[in-house]
Amino acid sequence: MQGNPRQIFVPYNGKIADITHADTNKHTLDLATALSETRKIIAVNLTCNRIAGVGWLYVYPNEEVTGYVVGTWMNIHMLVVIANGTQRLQYRLDAVNDDHDLYCSGYVVEA
């Protein structure tokens, strides 16, 4: 019988994406690349800051249609569960050409 994989929290302090698109379609951010991580990413702790524009940045925990991070003048924090086996974060802008910075303060991996 195989035991449960060990999960660990990895502290991180930095911007992982500058998000600006000329559409409101769903996009994905490759977290393995953004975080320089080779282990399986399970969840990320995010902060979103709206730099310019009027809309929101929606993120989709586990690539479902629930949850969002609102980009405003204040920091909004959210722990986002990543869809199994994807290593990516799915998101979309509420308004075209808005500019949002996405920061990570840590993430959970399988060790």
Image (cartoon, rainbow, N blue to C red):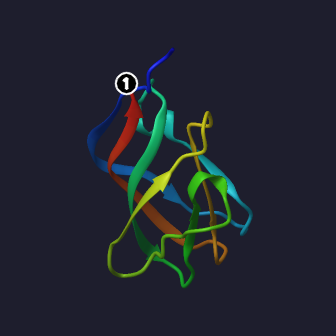
Q: Residue at x 36, y 44 (%)?
A: 107
Q: In this picture, is 105 found above or below 55? A: above
In the figure, is residue 11 to the left or right of 95?
Answer: left
Q: In this picture, is 28 found above or below 57? A: above
Q: Nearer the viewer, residue 76 or 20?
A: 76
Q: Where is residue 87 in the image (x, y as percent from the top left)?
A: 56, 37
Q: Which of 98 and 29 is in front in this view?
A: 29
Instruction: Answer with the quarter of the image where residue 56 lies.
Output: bottom right
Question: Callout 1: few (<14), some (14-19), or many (20+) C-alpha neighbours within 10 Å?
Answer: few
How many marks can you see? 1
In the figure, is residue 25 to the left or right of 59?
Answer: right
- Element marked by disc 1: loop
Q: Position of residue 33 (x, y in %)?
A: 49, 34
Q: Quarter of the image containing the C terminus?
A: top left
Which residue is under mark 1?
Answer: 111
Q: Residue at x 54, y 70 (%)?
A: 68
**Residue that sits furthest to the top in the current view:** 1
Q: Which residue is drawn at 42% across and 49% down?
A: 44
Q: Which residue is drawn at 54% across and 46% down?
A: 82
Q: Where is residue 106 in the image (x, y as percent from the top left)?
A: 31, 47
* Callout 1 amino acid: Ala
Q: Nearer the viewer, residue 49 or 58?
A: 58
Q: Position of residue 53 (x, y in %)?
A: 53, 80
**Residue that sits furthest to the front in the current view:** 1
Q: In this picture, is 85 found above or below 49? A: above
